[in-house]
Structure formats: C-alpha cells, structure tokens
Amino acid sequence: MNKHLNLLFTAIGNIIRNKVRSIVLVLCLIAVLFPFVTALSISEGIKFQSLISVEEGADIYVTMDYFGSNTPISLDYLDRFRKMEGVTKVFPRIVGRAYFANRLATIVGIFPENSPKSIRFAQGRMFRERGEVVVGEGLAREFHLQLGVRFSLSINSSKLLKVVGIFDSDATIWSANLILMSFEDASEFFKMKGKATDILIYTRPGYGPVLAKEIQEAASASNPDQLETSLRVQDKLLVKRYFQRGFNYKAGVFTALYTVAFALAIPALLIISGFGQTERRKEIGIIKATGWQTQEVMEMVALENLVISLTSAPISILLAMVWLKWFNGAFIAQFFIAEIGLMAPFPVPSRFLPLPCLFAFLFAIVLTMVGSLYSTWKTATVPPVEAMR
Amino acid sequence: MSGKIIFYLLFLAVLIALTVMMIALDQYSWKRIHSDQMVAFQRMVGGVGMGAISVPIWNFINFDPRIQPIDDSTLWPIPGGYSYGPDRTATVSYFEEIPFNQLSLEK
C-alpha cells in the first residue's frame, strides 16, 4: 500500500514540477470535455421539458393526409369524434408560424376554456375577448412589447391584435417566441375558417390506441364512397416513439459530430502529451537507473493521468454548470438549441446527471492513457543510458 | 511529502467534493422544480414543442413532429437531397419520421 501511495505522491510531484505540460494537458481536456458536458446537460434539460409536452399533450392527434403530409382538418370531424366511446375531451387547435418583424414566431390558436386556472403569466392575463393575444417573453423582451400594445402582421394585416399577457419565461423553451390567441382569431389570422391544424382527442386510460385504430379504419373504410382524403392519426405511443428516437437513440447529429471530434482529440492529445517528451524520457531513464521497475514507471504515469483526469473532469463540469446556470449558456447554448441567438431569451434548461459526468471523467482518462501509456512503455523498456541520451 | 503535494491533494479533494455536491444540488433542484407552469402551459396548448429549437424555422419536424412528422426540406430546392434545415445539424435532438407499413399485397 505504502508503495502505491508513494507512487501517487511522486506522480503529483511530477505534475507540479512540469507545470506547463500539466496545464496544457488540463486545458486541452477541458476544451474537449466542456462542450460534451454542456451538450449532455442541455439535452437532459430539454428532454425533461419535452417529456412534459408529451405527457400533457393529447392522447390522439388527427389531421388530414394530403400527398403524404399532415394538412388541416375540417371541424366537421369534431362531433364524430366526440360521440366515440372512451373519449373524454375533443378540441381543435391551430399551430402555425409567422414573422414578427424579423423574428419567427409560433402562432397557436386554442379555445380559452382549455386554459387551466393555475397558469401564471409574467404580466397581464389570459385572452378573453376577440383580438387579444398572449405573447412569449422572448418576443416581448426583444421588441419591448408591453400590455395593451396593438399590432398586425403582414400575413393578414387587417387582423389587429392586442397584447394582454406575457408568458412566464419559466414555462418552456417553446413559449418564448409564441403568440397565443383564441381559435377563432387564429382561423381569421391564417384565413382558414372551419379548419384546424389538428384535432386533439383525450381519452379514458387505455382507450387511446384502440380509438386511434378505430378512427383510422373508419376513415379508410369511408373513403372510396365519400371521396374524402384520408386521415392521419397519431396516438401517444407514436409520439413517445418520436421522443425516444429523437433524444435517446439518435441524441442528435451532435453525437456523431462529437464522436468525430473525440476521435480527432486522441491523436491530438497523443502529440500534446508528448510535449516535453525529451524531459520525460530523461526522467524515466533516471528513475530506471535508480532501480525502478518498468511496471512501477507505468503505474506512476497511470496515476499521473488519473490525477490529471480527476482535475480536468470536475473543472469541466463546474465550468459548464457556472456557464449554464449563471450566464444562461451565453454564446454556447446556440450550438445545441437552434434559433436562440447569442443570448437565449429563456432560461436554458440544463440538468447535470451523474452518469454523463462520469462519462466525462472516463473520456478524460481514456484520452490521457491513450496519449501516454504506449510512449512511456517504449521509453521504459529501453536501457536507461539510451533513454537519458 | 512536500507541502505542495499536500496542497494539491487538498485542492483535488475539495474540487471533487464540490463537483459531487453541485451535481447532487442540481439533482435536488430538478426534483423540487416547479414544473406546474410547464404542465399548465402544455395542458393548455395540447402539447406544443418537443425538440431543441425554439421556433419552427425551416420545418416543423424538429420543433414538434406531432404537427408535421415529415422533413419537407428534403423536397426542395433539390428533391431527394439531404435536409437543408439548419435546425437539423448540431442540436441535441433529432426527430425522424417513423415509417409505417402502408403496403398490402393481394394475390
């Protein structure tokens, strides 16, 4: 035990003695690990919000299917769905997009009855009358929108809208640039009377998949006679599969990009850890000449790597935490969340789970070991005189 | 053992302890997070938004595949090309259309 402890102290002594080499190595590891930890924590944060969106969403979403894409559905279907057994609630909604000056906004039209009493706003209240809208905090902040401001958008300039509420920025990342209005207002705004983007069906527990199948089959059966286009039915199971594939299986193209970056980092560190190689060769030669075994040299270098990894991984994690929690991921969050600009208009969701942090440490140790063990072994196995030359 | 080594060991211990504590604190804060506003918002709108993008800039799929599960940016300007949506590049989510069998063979 004493021998291992002594090797550890020697390893730390080496790190302190070779300040420049150690600092360069730690900085390189931080540069590799920081984006990795940041991205994984943002991913976990968004996943948390996304899961709420899936769970609190409808059990079935019905749209029309034109040429293989989702298209607006007629409100005539509402009664048909309401009469189905197991259905608890049916409502249509409109989801569209429009430019608010140069900023793209998501327009959502719903019936005000759907708004829960517990909903809080940063300012103002829920819309009650025609023409009233609630806007996201991102839009409000960027364009200095205040309660009572009236505006129209060029998509339908005759439709005058009035800001009566501003969403709380804590809601979700998707509410930051959102304009919420009544279903009728959204219909008028997009000039799509009698149509909805989708019809949302809420069912009693366990009825969802059965009803989804029933709706799909009924639509397919009625098509040949009624010449209707077919319906597209998405149930919660399908939506959960989107979620799982979107976050768990693929985890974004980011993973692929990071793998490439990681693969490149190994040879880069191989070169970097050779920084001061002559000095290192001399060191190994001297300690070999004083009676050290190759195994002890290898253990000392491995311990050096362990200490370097134990230094750089926690620093990367703490740095990522500080950057995301205190500076709201300024400059860096835009790489992982699209369309938020340099400064996110909402609190960037980030969640630091133990496993990704452990991965960060493992990455660090693999990188340093790959970069040093082989070269150390090569030096340690040659005669000390040759190593010191 | 020199003073510098002791100092470094202490620094390492403090660093690791601080990191573990911060991770634990973050875990705790997420457990205590008042997600009621997120729940209320999503309940109100019927579920809007799923991906790591704040607005549906190029297509809806990465914003919310429930609204449009098709990446129609592959259809233009060059049909059959790769996705041109900037939101399909390096964000931390990537939604794809889930294929389902529409084929029925008859003898």
Image (cartoon, grey):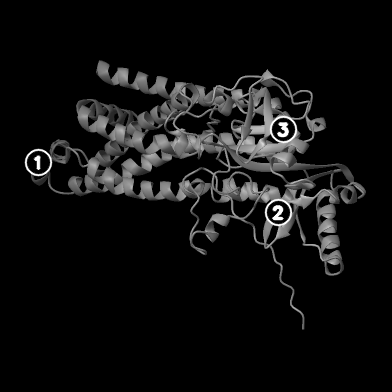
Q: Residue at x 56, y 36 (%)?
A: A44
SS at circle 3:
strand
Q: Quadrant of residue A47?
A: top right
* Alpha carbon separation for disc pair 3 and 1: 78 Å
Does the image show residue A166?
A: yes
Q: Which mark is residue A181?
A: 3
Residue A9 % position (x, y): 28, 26
What kind of residue is marked 2? Thr
Does the image show residue B34?
A: no
Query: Foreground: A192 or A48?
Result: A192
Q: Mark 2 or 1 closer to N-term?
A: 2
Q: Which residue is drawn at 24% across and 25% down?
A: A16
Q: Which of marks 2 and 1 is in front?
A: 2
Q: Mark 3 or 2 closer to N-term?
A: 2
Query: Foreground: A250 or A302?
Result: A250
Residue A282 % position (x, y): 12, 38
Q: Which mark is residue A388?
A: 1
SS at circle 2:
strand
Farthest bottom residue in view: B107
Q: Pointer 1 indicates a residue of which chain?
A: A
